[in-house]
Image: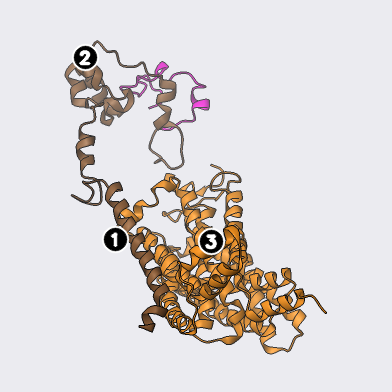
Chain colours: A orange, B brown
C-alpha cells in the first residue's frame, strides 16, 4: 500500500487529525501568548511594552474568535456545537473546552477590552455619525460616565480581570497540551510536560506575533516604531524562548534516557518522516537561528535598523518553529503504528474542507478580523494620535 | 453613592451577562430533550424508540429451522462460524413470509469484502487479489460458498 511501511492496523493507515487540528493549538497558542504580553503591562507594570498592550488584546480577540473554526470544519455539523454547552459532559476534557473558551472570550478578553476602551468608545459615540455612532452607542451600554472616578474603577477592575486572565490563558492553552499529554495510549503524546511545553511555546508564538503585527502596522501607518518597546518585547521573547526550548529539550532528553519500548520506533520516525519538520524546521531554522539572532541583539549594540530586521526575521522564524512543533505533535503522533512495527504517511488534501486552502483561509481570517477591530477600536497610543492630528492640522 | 453611580456601567455589563445566562437557560430548557440524563449522558427515550424499530434480522437459529441441509454443509466447512445473514443480508421478512424470496447474491462482489488481500489481515486468513485469482469470474464457479474448500485438491 502506498505510503505505508511495515505493519499498520487498518484504523491507523489514514490520519484522521488533519492540518486543521495542527492549526487549532497554533491559533489558541497565539491567543494565550498575546494575552500574556498584554498582562506584562497591566500586572507586571512593564511600561516599555505599553504601546503593544491594546494591540495584543485585539490580536488575542481576533484569533480567539477563529479558534473553534478549525475544529468545526474538522468535525462537520457546526449546528451541533452548542450541545456541549447545553448538555456538558464533565468527564470529557474536550467537552469542557467549550466552557473554558466562553469564559476566556467573554469574562476575560471582551470584558477587559471593553473596560480599557470605554473612554474611547464614549468619545467615539459622540464624535462619529450614522451607523458607526449607533454601533459605538450600543457598545457604551448606554453609559457615558467617563469621570476620573469611573475610569479609576475601570482601571482597578481591569487589573483584577487581567489577574484572573493569566491563569485563564494558561488553562486555555494548557488544556490543549493536556488533551495530548493525557493520552496514555500514544507514547508520542503521553507526557506530563506536554501542557507546560504548549504554554511556553504559546507565549513565544503570541509575543512574536504581536511584535510582528506591531511593526507591520506601524510601517503601514507610516509611524515611527517605538524601539524601546520592540527591544523589550524581543528581550521577553528571547528569555521565554530559552525557557520553552529548555523544556522541549528536557522532554527530549527524558525520552532518550528513559528509552521505553516505543523509543526505537519514535527515534526512527524523528530521523525519517519527521526529520525535515522537526530537526530542520522546528529545531534548527525555527529555534536555534532566532535564538542566536536574539542573543546577538542582547549582547551587542546594533543600530536600530538592523535590530528591526532581526526582530522581523526572528518573529517569522518563531512562527515557523511553533507551527512545526504543533505539526510534529499532531501529525507525528499519528504516523506510527501502535504495534511499533509500521509507519504511515499524511497526504494533505488541497481543496477539501480539511485541506491546505482551508488551513490558509483560517490562518488569514483572524488577520482580517483584526483589521476590522483595528478600524473599530484604534489601539494606537494617545501620543501617536496627537502626532497624527498635528500632522493633519492645516499650517497657518 | 458615588461608587454606585460611577460603577453603573459595570452593573450594566453584569446585567448583560445575567440576561445572556437567562436566555441560555430558556433555550436549554427547550432544546434539551425531556428525558436527557434520566439514566446517563443520553436521551432515555431513545431506548424505547430504538426498541420500536422493525426487526430486520431473523437470526441464524431461525434460518436453521428450515434450512437444516445447508446447515449440515456449513458446519463441516470453514464458514461454520459465519452467520447466514452476514452474507445473505437481513432476512426477517423472508423468515416471516417464506414466499418473499431472498435477493440473489453476486459472489464476485460479496466474497471480496472479506477475502481481498490486505497486509492488516492475519497470514492464515484466506485472501486473494481478485484480478489475479479469478479475473472477475464469480467465486461460486469453483467454491461452494457454504463450504468453500475445493474438495479435489485445489485451494482451501
Residue B140 lies in the magenta-colored region: yes
| Chain bearing mark 2 | B
Q: Which residue is mark 1?
A: A90
Give A130 or B75, whichever is nearer the viewer.
Answer: A130
Give the answer, above or below, for where A327 lies relative to B50.
Answer: below
Give the mark toward the camera: 1 or 3.
3
Left-right relation of A124 to A386:
left
Q: Which residue is mark 3?
A: A135
Residue A213 quadrant: bottom right
Residue at 72 percent of width and 80 percent of height: A307
Q: Mark 1 falls on what kind of element?
A: loop
Q: Are marks 2 and 3 on the same chain?
A: no
Residue A1 x, y percent position in the rendering: 53, 42
Give the mark toward the camera: 2 or 1.
1
| Chain bearing mark 3 | A
Quick one: label 3, few (<14), some, or many (20+) residues within 10 Å? some
Q: Mark 3 falls on what kind of element?
A: helix
Give the magenta range. B127-156
Give A25 or A44, whichever is nearer the viewer.
Answer: A44
Give the mark toward the camera: 2 or 3.
3
Left-right relation of A47 to A289:
left
Q: Which residue is mark 2?
A: B97
Amino acid at each position: 500500500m502506498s505510503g505505508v511501511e511495515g505493519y499498520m492496523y487498518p484504523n491507523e493507515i489514514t490520519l484522521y487529525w488533519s492540518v486543521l487540528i495542527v492549526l487549532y493549538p497554533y491559533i489558541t497558542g497565539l491567543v494565550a501568548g498575546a494575552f500574556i504580553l498584554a498582562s506584562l503591562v497591566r500586572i507586571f507594570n512593564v511600561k516599555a511594552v505599553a504601546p503593544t498592550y491594546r494591540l495584543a488584546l485585539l490580536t488575542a480577540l481576533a484569533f480567539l474568535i477563529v479558534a473553534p473554526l478549525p475544529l468545526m470544519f474538522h468535525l462537520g455539523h457546526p449546528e451541533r456545537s452548542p450541545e456541549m454547552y447545553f448538555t456538558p459532559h464533565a468527564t470529557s476534557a474536550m467537552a469542557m473546552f467549550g466552557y473554558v473558551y466562553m469564559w476566556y472570550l467573554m469574562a476575560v478578553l471582551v470584558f477587559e477590552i471593553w473596560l480599557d476602551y470605554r473612554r474611547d468608545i464614549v468619545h467615539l459615540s459622540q464624535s462619529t455619525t450614522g451607523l458607526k455612532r449607533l454601533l459605538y452607542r450600543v457598545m457604551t451600554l448606554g453609559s457615558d460616565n467617563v469621570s476620573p472616578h469611573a475610569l479609576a474603577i475601570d482601571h482597578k477592575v481591569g487589573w483584577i480581570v487581567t489577574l484572573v486572565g493569566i491563569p485563564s490563558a494558561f488553562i486555555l492553552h494548557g488544556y490543549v497540551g493536556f488533551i495530548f499529554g493525557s493520552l496514555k495510549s500514544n507514547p508520542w503524546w503521553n507526557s506530563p510536560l506536554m501542557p507546560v511545553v504548549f504554554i511556553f511555546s504559546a507565549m513565544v508564538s503570541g509575543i512574536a506575533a504581536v511584535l510582528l503585527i506591531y511593526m507591520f502596522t506601524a510601517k503601514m501607518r507610516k509611524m515611527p516604531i517605538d524601539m524601546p518597546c520592540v527591544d523589550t518585547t524581543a528581550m521577553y521573547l528571547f528569555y521565554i524562548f530559552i525557557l520553552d526550548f529548555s523544556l522541549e529539550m528536557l522532554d527530549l532528553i527524558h525520552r532518550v534516557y528513559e528509552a521505553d519500548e516505543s523509543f526505537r520506533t519514535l527515534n526512527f520516525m524523528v530521523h525519517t518522516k519527521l526529520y525535515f519538520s522537526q530537526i530542520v524546521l522546528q529545531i534548527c531554522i525555527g529555534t536555534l537561528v532566532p535564538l542566536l539572532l536574539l542573543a546577538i541583539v542582547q549582547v551587542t549594540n546594533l543600530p536600530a535598523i538592523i535590530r528591526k530586521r532581526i526582530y522581523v526575521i526572528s518573529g517569522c522564524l518563531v512562527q515557523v518553529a511553533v507551527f512545526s512543533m504543533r505539526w510534529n505533535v499532531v501529525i507525528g503522533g499519528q504516523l506510527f503504528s501502535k504495534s511499533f512495527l509500521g509507519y504511515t504517511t499524511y497526504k494533505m488534501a488541497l481543496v477539501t474542507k480539511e485541506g491546505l486552502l482551508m488551513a490558509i483561509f483560517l490562518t488569514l481570517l483572524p488577520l482580517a478580523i483584526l483589521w476590522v477591530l483595528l478600524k473599530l477600536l484604534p489601539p494606537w497610543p494617545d501620543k501617536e494620535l496627537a502626532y497624527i492630528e498635528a500632522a493633519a492640522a492645516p499650517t497657518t | 453613592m458615588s461608587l454606585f453611580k460611577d460603577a453603573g456601567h459595570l452593573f450594566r455589563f453584569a446585567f448583560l451577562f445575567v440576561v445572556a445566562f437567562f436566555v441560555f437557560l430558556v433555550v436549554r430548557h427547550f432544546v434539551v430533550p425531556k428525558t436527557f440524563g434520566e439514566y446517563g449522558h443520553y436521551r432515555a427515550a431513545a431506548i424505547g424508540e430504538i426498541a420500536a424499530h422493525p426487526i430486520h434480522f431473523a437470526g441464524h437459529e431461525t434460518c436453521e429451522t428450515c434450512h437444516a441441509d445447508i446447515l449440515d454443509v456449513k458446519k463441516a466447512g470453514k464458514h461454520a462460524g459465519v452467520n447466514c445473514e452476514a452474507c445473505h443480508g437481513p432476512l426477517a421478512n423472508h423468515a416471516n413470509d417464506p414466499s418473499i424470496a431472498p435477493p440473489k447474491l453476486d459472489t464476485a462482489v460479496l466474497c471480496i469484502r472479506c477475502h481481498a488481500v490486505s497486509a492488516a489481515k492475519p497470514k492464515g486468513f484466506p485472501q486473494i487479489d481478485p484480478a489475479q485469482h479469478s479475473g472477475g469470474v464469480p467465486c461460486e464457479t469453483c467454491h461452494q460458498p457454504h463450504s468453500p474448500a475445493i474438495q479435489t485438491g485445489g485451494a482451501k
